[in-house]
Image (cartoon, rainbow, N blue to C red):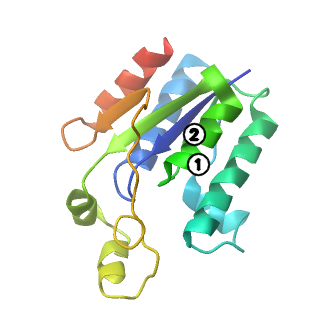
Amino acid sequence: MGRVLWFTGLSGSGKTTITELLKKEFDKLGKSYQVFDGDDVRRELHRHLGFTPGDIKENNRLIIELCKKVIDKVDYIMVPIISPFRESREEARKNFGKEFVEIYINCSYNECKKRDVKGLYTRAEAGELENFIGLHVPYEPPTNSEIEIDSVKQKPEEAVKKIIDFIGL
């Protein structure tokens, strides 16, 4: 059975960057993996969902189901997704038990806004986007994550080392 590495944090916190570096490390180590990136999954499979709190929870639930389908086929499943609600993350934890690793990419709203290459924060603050997580929809930081990365103080490469050390590779 594989392990689920569930990355959570605001848009722009560094979840995808760290996942991309971790993929390279897994390749070097000969580990198999699947990535369910929140943006990609929403664009390809869950287009019917919006960004209301209910739709966000449903998207997270559906990603849990995707993970269940491949957990026995790979060593690691990486899920870089904002996942703003503790309830959704706890649901994932319940489903995967000790094989679930919550990785909190801690980065302030203002820092994420500075990093925002997509312009989402500016658009949300201008009223062009509704239900923006961190502005209109509160982000509920984890209270019991296995790993916390401060992406302002730690470089992505340091984050990958911390994750690799935690999972024992």
Instruction: Residue at 68%, 60% (x, y): give it.
Output: 58
Viewer-side residue, 2 vs 51: 51
Instruction: Residue at 36%, 88% (x, y): give it.
Output: 127
Q: Position of residue 131 (x, y in %)?
A: 46, 75
Vertical position of residue 84 compared to residue 4: above or below: below
| Rendered image quadrant of residue 46 | bottom right
Image mark count: 2
Task: Using residue 74 as the reference point, say whether residue 132 is left or right of it.
Answer: left
At mark 1, the secondary structure is: helix
Instruction: Residue at 34%, 33% (x, y): give it.
Output: 148
Residue beneath label 2, please?
A: 90
Vertical position of residue 47 compared to residue 128: above or below: above
Q: Quadrant of the N terminus?
A: top right
| Amino acid at the residue labelled 2 | Glu
Q: Residues within 10 Å of mark 2 (few under 14, many from 20)?
A: some
Q: Is residue 150 visible?
A: yes
Label pair 2/1, CB-CB below 8 angstroms: yes
At mark 2, the secondary structure is: helix
Residue beneath label 1, please?
A: 88
Viewer-side residue, 114 vs 105: 105
Q: Position of residue 110 (x, y in %)?
A: 21, 62
Query: Separation of disc 2 and disc 1 at Cα?
Result: 5 Å
Instruction: Residue at 42%, 31% (x, y): give it.
Output: 144
Return the mark for residue 108.
none
The single residue placed furthest to the top in the displayed view is 168
Q: Can residue 33 be seen in this view?
A: no
